C-alpha cells in the first residue's frame, strides 16, 4: 500500500520553503512503509545521499 | 484491496468450503446467509486464525472443542495426521497476495480420540504483475508484511461482529481508538520515522559533543531536555491508561452495585446505633435510680402527711393563742436591755420599750418545753408539706424523661433491625464488600491521577519550551564549531526533517480526528431514523468518542444498543473513508439489533459504501428480512447459503469454487 495522499500533501505543504528536505522525508516514509529492518544504516545513507545531491545541485 | 477467495479445510465445522468472491458489477456487496449455530461466527474466526492465529470471536463452547473438524478426527486411525488449512487470496492492485495458515494434527489414541497439534505454519505468496517469480514469505517475515496492510491491532475495524460493536465506546477504548486512527491513517509512519531519526541524531550529537566545552554543555543540556520531554510524555501515557482502567472498573462495578444498599454506610450506621443505645441505656439506668429514690422519699412523706398537717394546725392554734414563746433569742433581748438601745436601728429605748422587752424575756423563760419544741419543728413541718405538694410535678417529670428515653431506645432498635435485615438479605455480601472497596480505591486513584495528569500536561508545555530553547542554543554552538563540518551538516539537515515530520504528525492527527468525527456523524445520521435528536460526534483529546444531544448533553451512555452498534459502524466507515484505507469490511450480523426503518437505512448505506469497498456480510434468515432482501438482491455480487449436514459439517448450498 502506498503512502496516504493526505500525508504526502501535508509534507508538500510543510516543505514549501524547505524543498531540499522534502525528498529525504519522502524516502524515510517509504522506508517505514516497506517495513524494512536496520533503519540506522539506511537512514544515515539516505541523509548523506541527499546532502550530496544538494551539494551537486548547488555546484 | 479485496478478498477474491477464501478456502477453508477441516477447520471446525467446515470440512471443505470455497468462497469465490467474484466482482463484475458496480457494487462489491457479498452475503453469507446461515441459521444460528451453522457457522457464521466461525467463518470470522477462520479468517482471524488464518491471518493472526487467534480466534477473536470464540464462545466458551468453541474453546473446549479442538480446531480440527470432529468428523475428520473420528475417521482418523491411530498415528494418522490431518491438516487444518485456511487460505485467503487478496487482490491488491497489481499484486495477488495469498495468505495461508496450516496446522497438522496427529491422533495418538483411537480409544480416546485425543489429538495433538504441531505448531502452525504461516505463509504469504506475493505475485506481482511485473515480477517474473512469485515471492514467498514465511512466519515472522510474513506476519510483518501482513501488518502493513491488515494490522492485527486494528483488526476489529475490518473484521467484526455485532456482539462487540456496542462495547466500542466504553471509556477504556480510547487508546484503542487513538491507535486505530494512527494506524489506519498511516500517521504512524510519521511517528516511526521521527522516532528513528531522533535516534540517529542522538548518535551524531554524542559523537561530536566533546569538540568544545560550550558544545558539550549545549549538547548535554539538549539531551537532558529531550529526555525530560520523553519522560513526561511516557508518564502522561501511563496516567491516561491508568485513568481509562479506573473508569472501566468503576463502570463495571457500578453495574454490579446498582440498586444494592450501601453496605459500608449501613455498617457505619450500625456502629453509631450501638453507641447511641449504650448511652441511652445508661440514661435509663440513671432515671430508674432517680425514680427509686423518689418513691422511697415520697413513701415516707405521703404516709406522714396527714399527721404533719394535724401537728401544724395545732402549732398555728397555739401561736394564735399566744402560747408559743416568741421566736427570738433571749441573749439578744438581754443585750438590748443592757445598752438600753435597739441593736438593729440604734434608737434609744423608751420606758415602754424596756417594759416590753422585760415581758418577752419573762415569757420565754417561763414557756413550756412542748411549746419550745413546737416552735423548733414548725419550719421543718412547713418544708415537709411543701415537698409533699411537689409530688405530682416531680413524678410527672421523671416519668416523662423515662418515657422519652424508652422511645429513643425503641426507635434505635427498630432501625438496627431494619439494617440487619437488609444486610442479611444479601448472600453475596462479602463479594459486594470487595467490589465496593475496589470501587472506592479506583475512585480515589481516578481523582489523584486526573490531578497528576493536569500537572504533567502543564509540565510538558514548559519542558517542550525548554527543549526548543536548548535545541536552538545547541544549533548556535554547532554553527560556531570548526570541526566535524560534514557531520554538522548532517545534523542540521536531519533536524530540519525531524521538525517538519513532528509538526506534520501533530497537525495531521488533529485534522484526521476532526474529519473522522464529522464523517462519523454524517454516517450515523444516514443510518438512524432520529433526525432531530443528535447534534454532533466528538472525539476529545483523550480519544473518547461521544455523541452530543441537540441540547449539548453527552448521549453515548443513554444510546440504545442498536444506536451504539450503528455508531460503531459509522465510526469504522468514517475511518476507512477519511484515511483512504482500502481493506474489505467483514461484518457478522450487521442488522441483528436494528429494526425496520433503521434496517432499510442501514442497507442503503452499505449499498453506497460497497461501490468503493468490498463488504462481506454474514446474516441469519431473520435478518435477511423483506426490506433488506429487496435492497441487497438487486446489487449483491455474491450470495452464499450455508447449511449443516448431520449437525457436524457446514457446506455451501450455493456459490462458486475458487480456481
Image (tube, helix red, strand yellow):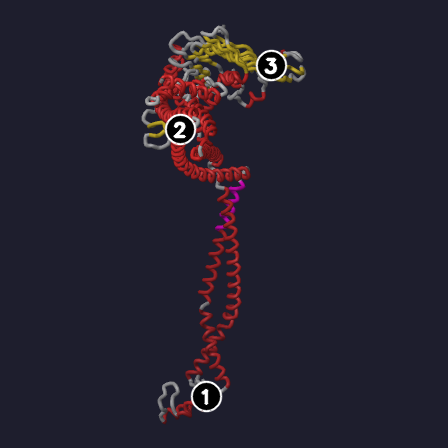
- Who comes first in sequence, dot 2 or dot 1? 1
Label 1 Cα crowd, 10 Å radius (few <14 / some 14-19 / many 20+):
few
Q: Dots 2 and 3: beta carbons under 8 Å? A: no
Give above or below for B648 relative to B310: above
Of residue B29 and residue B191, the one placed in the foreground of this image is B191
Q: Where in the figure is residue B219, as x and y percent of width and height?
A: 44, 33
Q: Secondary structure at mark 1?
A: helix
Q: Which residues are magenta?
A: B411-424
Q: Please tell me which residue is depicted at 60% across the width and 14% down the height of the picture.
A: B104
Q: Quadrant of residue A14?
A: top left
Q: Where in the figure is residue A39, as x and y percent of width and height?
A: 48, 21
Respond whether the residues carrying marks 1 and 3 are from the same subunit.
yes
Instruction: Give the foreground label among 1 and 3.
Output: 3
Instruction: Give the foreground label among 2 and 1.
Output: 2
Which residue is under mark 3?
A: B104
Q: Is residue B446 visible?
A: yes
Label 3 Cα crowd, 10 Å radius (few <14 / some 14-19 / many 20+):
some
Which residue is under mark 1?
A: B331
Give above or below for B552 relative to B645: below
Q: How far is mark 2 from mark 1, CA to CA?
A: 108 Å
- Who comes first in sequence, dot 2 or dot 3? 3
Q: Where in the figure is residue B182, as x and y percent of width and height?
A: 42, 24
Q: How far is mark 1 from mark 3, CA to CA?
A: 135 Å
Chain under callout 2: B
Chain under callout 1: B
Q: Quadrant of residue B547?
A: top left
Residue B419 counted in the magenta span: yes
Instruction: Classify the position of the N terminus of chain B by image quarter.
Output: top left
Which residue is under mark 2?
A: B545
Amino acid at each position: 500500500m502506498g503512502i496516504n495522499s493526505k500525508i504526502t500533501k501535508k509534507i508538500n505543504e510543510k516543505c514549501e520553503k524547505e524543498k531540499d528536505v522534502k525528498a529525504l522525508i519522502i524516502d524515510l516514509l517509504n522506508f517505514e512503509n516497506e517495513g524494512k529492518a536496520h533503519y540506522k544504516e539506511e537512514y544515515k545513507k539516505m541523509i548523506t545521499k541527499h546532502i550530496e545531491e544538494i551539494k551537486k545541485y548547488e555546484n | 484491496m479485496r478478498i477474491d477467495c477464501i478456502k477453508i479445510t477441516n477447520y471446525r465445522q467446515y470440512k471443505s468450503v470455497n468462497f469465490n468472491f467474484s466482482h463484475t458489477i458496480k457494487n462489491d456487496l457479498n452475503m453469507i446467509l446461515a441459521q444460528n449455530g451453522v457457522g457464521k461466527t466461525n467463518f470470522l474466526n477462520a479468517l482471524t486464525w488464518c491471518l493472526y492465529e487467534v480466534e477473536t470471536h470464540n464462545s466458551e463452547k468453541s474453546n473446549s472443542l479442538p480446531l480440527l473438524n470432529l468428523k475428520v478426527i473420528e475417521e482418523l486411525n491411530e498415528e494418522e495426521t490431518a491438516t487444518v488449512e485456511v487460505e485467503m487470496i487478496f487482490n491488491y492492485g497489481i499484486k495477488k497476495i495469498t495468505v495461508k495458515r496450516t496446522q497438522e494434527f496427529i491422533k495418538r489414541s483411537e480409544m480416546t480420540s485425543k489429538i495433538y497439534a504441531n505448531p502452525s505454519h504461516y505463509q504469504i505468496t506475493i505475485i506481482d504483475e511485473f515480477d517474473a517469480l512469485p515471492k514467498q514469505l514465511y512466519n515472522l517475515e510474513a506476519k510483518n508484511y501482513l501488518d502493513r496492510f491488515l494490522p492485527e491491532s486494528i483488526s476489529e475495524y475490518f473484521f467484526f461482529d455485532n456482539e462487540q460493536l456496542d462495547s466500542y465506546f466504553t471509556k477504556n477504548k480510547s487508546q484503542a481508538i487513538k491507535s486505530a486512527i494512527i494506524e489506519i491513517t498511516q500517521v504512524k509512519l510519521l511517528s516511526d520515522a521521527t522516532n528513528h531519526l531522533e535516534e540517529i541524531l542522538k548518535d551524531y550529537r554524542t559523537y561530536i559533543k566533546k569538540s568544545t566545552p560550550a558544545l558539550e554543555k549545549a549538547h548535554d543540556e539538549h539531551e537532558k531536555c529531550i529526555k525530560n520531554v520523553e519522560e513526561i510524555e511516557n508518564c502522561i501515557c501511563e496516567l491516561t491508561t491508568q485513568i481509562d482502567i479506573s473508569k472501566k472498573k468503576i463502570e463495571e462495578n457500578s453495574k454490579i452495585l446498582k440498586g444494592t444498599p450501601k453496605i459500608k454506610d449501613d455498617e457505619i450506621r450500625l456502629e453509631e446505633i450501638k453507641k447511641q443505645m449504650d448511652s441511652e441505656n445508661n440514661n435509663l439506668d440513671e432515671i430508674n435510680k432517680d425514680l427509686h429514690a423518689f418513691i422511697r422519699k415520697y413513701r415516707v412523706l405521703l404516709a406522714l402527711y396527714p399527721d404533719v398537717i394535724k401537728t401544724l394546725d395545732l402549732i398555728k392554734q397555739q401561736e394564735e393563742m399566744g402560747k408559743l414563746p416568741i421566736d427570738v433569742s433571749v441573749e439578744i433581748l438581754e443585750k438590748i436591755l443592757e445598752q438600753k438601745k435597739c441593736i438593729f436601728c440604734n434608737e434609744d429605748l423608751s420606758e415602754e420599750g424596756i417594759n416590753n422587752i422585760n415581758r418577752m424575756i419573762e415569757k420565754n423563760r417561763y414557756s413550756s418545753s412542748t411549746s419550745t419544741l413546737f416552735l423548733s419543728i414548725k419550719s421543718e413541718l412547713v418544708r415537709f408539706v411543701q415537698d409533699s405538694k411537689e409530688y405530682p410535678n416531680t413524678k410527672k417529670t421523671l416519668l416523662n424523661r423515662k418515657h422519652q428515653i424508652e422511645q429513643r431506645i425503641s426507635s434505635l432498635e427498630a432501625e438496627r433491625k431494619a439494617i440487619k435485615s437488609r444486610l442479611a438479605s444479601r448472600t453475596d455480601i462479602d463479594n459486594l464488600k470487595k467490589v465496593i472497596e475496589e470501587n472506592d480505591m479506583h475512585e480515589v486513584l481516578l481523582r489523584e491521577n486526573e490531578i497528576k495528569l493536569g500537572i504533567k500536561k502543564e509540565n510538558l508545555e514548559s519542558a517542550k519550551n525548554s527543549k526548543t530553547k536548548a535545541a536552538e542554543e545547541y544549533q548556535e554552538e554547532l554553527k560556531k564549531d570548526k570541526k566535524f563540518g560534514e557531520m554538522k551538516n548532517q545534523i542540521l539537515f536531519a533536524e530540519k526533517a525531524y521538525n517538519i515530520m513532528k509538526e506534520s504528525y501533530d497537525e495531521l492527527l488533529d485534522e484526521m480526528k476532526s474529519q473522522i468525527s464529522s464523517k462519523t456523524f454524517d454516517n450515523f445520521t444516514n443510518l438512524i431514523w432520529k433526525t432531530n435528536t443528535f447534534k454532533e460526534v466528538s472525539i476529545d483529546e483523550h480519544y473518547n468518542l461521544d455523541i452530543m444531544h441537540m441540547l449539548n448533553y453527552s448521549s453515548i451512555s443513554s444510546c440504545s444498543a442498536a444506536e451504539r452498534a450503528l455508531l460503531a459502524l459509522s465510526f469504522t466507515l468514517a475511518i476507512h473513508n477519511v484515511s483512504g484505507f482500502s481493506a474489505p469490511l467483514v461484518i457478522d450480523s450487521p442488522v441483528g439489533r436494528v429494526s425496520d426503518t433503521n434496517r432499510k437505512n442501514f442497507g442503503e448505506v452499505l449499498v453506497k459504501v460497497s461501490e468503493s469497498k468490498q463488504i462481506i456480510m454474514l446474516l441469519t434468515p431473520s435478518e435477511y428480512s423483506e426490506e433488506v432482501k429487496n435492497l441487497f438482491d438487486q446489487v449483491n455480487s455474491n450470495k452464499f447459503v450455508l447449511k449443516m449436514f448431520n449437525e457436524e459439517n457446514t457446506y455451501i448450498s450455493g456459490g462458486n469454487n475458487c480456481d
